[in-house]
Amino acid sequence: MRVVQVWISGRVQGVGYRFATQQQALRLGISGWVRNLPDGRVQAVFAGPSDAVEKMLAWCQQGPPAAQVTSVVAEPYLEPVTPGFVIR
């Protein structure tokens, strides 16, 4: 099990990034959440098998078709994660 907190920068708000992230996470069996930040970034927490989290991080580099991702920064996340994946 791997749990990471992620910050995604670029053109990631107003392009369906949170919804697409939720759909991808559910496909991969990942729990966690995603939300927009006031500074224009998207923040997410991903919890699941290491290989699934790696696939999710790789997906975040592209995101949905209208996104233009410039940076994905991940670090370990130590708080409990509720099962399921929600948009906050």
Image (cartoon, rainbow, N blue to C red):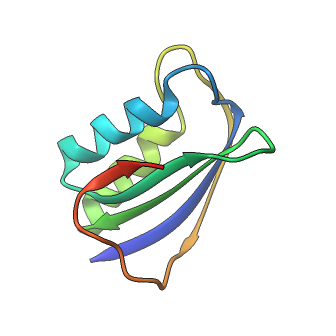
Residue 68 placement: quadrant: top right
Please tell me whether residue 16 is drawn above or below residue 37 in the rendered image: above
Please tell me whether residue 58 is drawn above or below residue 33 in the rendered image: above
Residue 21 placement: quadrant: top left
Which residue ends up furthest to the right in the rendered image?
A: 39
Give me the residue at 54% from left, 38% from top: 61
Left or right, 30 with reference to 67 = left
Give me the residue at 29% from left, 71% from top: 82
Q: How many marks?
A: 0
In the rendered image, residue 9, in percent from the top left (x then y), is placed at 71, 41
Give me the residue at 34% from left, 41% from top: 22
Where's the N terminus, which quadrant? bottom left
Please tell me whether residue 13 is drawn above or below residue 81 in the rendered image: above
Left or right, 81 with reference to 48 = right
Give me the residue at 45% from left, 50% from top: 57
Left or right, 64 with reference to 23 = right
Residue 23 placement: quadrant: top left
Which residue ends up furthest to the top in the rendered image?
A: 66
In the rendered image, residue 2, in percent from the top left (x then y), is placed at 35, 74
In the rendered image, residue 37, in percent from the top left (x then y), is placed at 69, 47
In the rendered image, residue 28, in percent from the top left (x then y), is placed at 21, 48
Which residue ends up furthest to the front in the rendered image?
A: 88
